[in-house]
Image: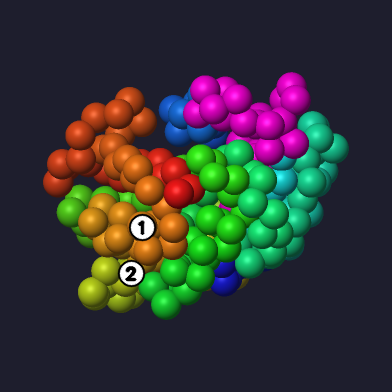
Amino acid sequence: MDLPDPYRDPDLVTLYDTDNPAGRDHRYYRELADALGARTVVDLGCGTGLLTRALATGTPRVTGVDPSPTMLDFARRQPGSERVRWVLGDAATIPPTGDIDLVVCTGNAVQHIPTDGLPAALRHVADALRPGGVLAFESRNPARREWQEWTRPATEGERRTPFGRLREWLEVTVAEDGRVVLDAHNVIDDGEDRVYTSVLHFRTAAELTAHLLAAGFSRVQVDGDWDGGPVTDASRILVFRAVRG
């Protein structure tokens, strides 16, 4: 998974867990791991490791994989990090052992994977999973067209942080053919605007299902929310659960 490092700034990475706290999504993945009785779990695109460390309670052997060295440096300093094996990299760094029970890819991280890289990334995950093992992830629903809400008037705000007052907003610079280029502006006290650009790929349920089947998965389930609701145009997310064939 070839991702840029939008959190290469050690100041901004300290805000990530505040901006993205544990919620219904984390509960969904924890409950799935429990229901599967998963003993080996990989959190692909683990970021700061908030969910990763929660998954590593009890007996599971948990590995957190992320391409951001800044994120992983932060993750390694958090309480409970010693229970996790942290790996810098993408899906290609997961050994093809064929014995992993569960791979999760949360925070819509799958949207960072470009279309030409998605088939290989899914094959790497499939090769790591045991027969009957599960890949679970979520992705924003393109029918919702959420990127239209990412404008400066709708997202601009100010707050105090440990490193000074921060003014921030989002702006979309490109939105075509399911590809959205998003600039996150972060202006600190000295006036410096730290702009971090993300490229997000919006894919339909049918498109992602086809990629999963081609990679060797079967019994692909797609829900429109964390409670197993149906997919509609109004669904904010698509929640996937695919079994290794």
Quadrant of the rendered image containing residue 228:
top left
Residue under pointer 2: 180
| 196 sits left or right of 169 in the view | right
The one nearer the camera, 111 or 77, is 111
- Residue at coordinates 50% horizontally, 28% vertically from top-left? 32
- Percent of width and height locating residue 47: 63, 51
- Residue at coordinates 34% horizontally, 45% vertically from top-left? 220
Pointers 2 and 1 in contact (C-beta within 8 Å):
no
Give above or below for 181 relative to 209: below
- Residue at coordinates 74% horizontally, 22% vertically from top-left? 58
**Magenta region includes residue 57:** yes
- Percent of width and height locating residue 213: 36, 57
**Magenta region includes residue 196:** no
Amino acid at the residue labelled 1: Leu
Amino acid at the residue labelled 2: Val
- Residue at coordinates 42% horizontally, 77% vertically from top-left? 116
Q: Circle 1 — which element?
A: helix
The CA span between labels 2 and 1 is 25 Å
Q: Give the range drawn in magenta.
A: 32-61
Question: Nearer the N terminus, badge 2 or badge 1?
Answer: 2
| 91 sits left or right of 162 in the view | left
The one nearer the camera, 196 or 239, is 239
Q: Residue 15 carries which label?
A: none
- Percent of width and height locating residue 168: 47, 56
Residue under pointer 1: 213
Tell me, yes or no, if residue 196 can be seen here: no
Quadrant of the rendered image containing residue 79:
top right
The one nearer the camera, 52 or 220, is 220
Tell me, yes or no, if residue 205 can be seen here: yes
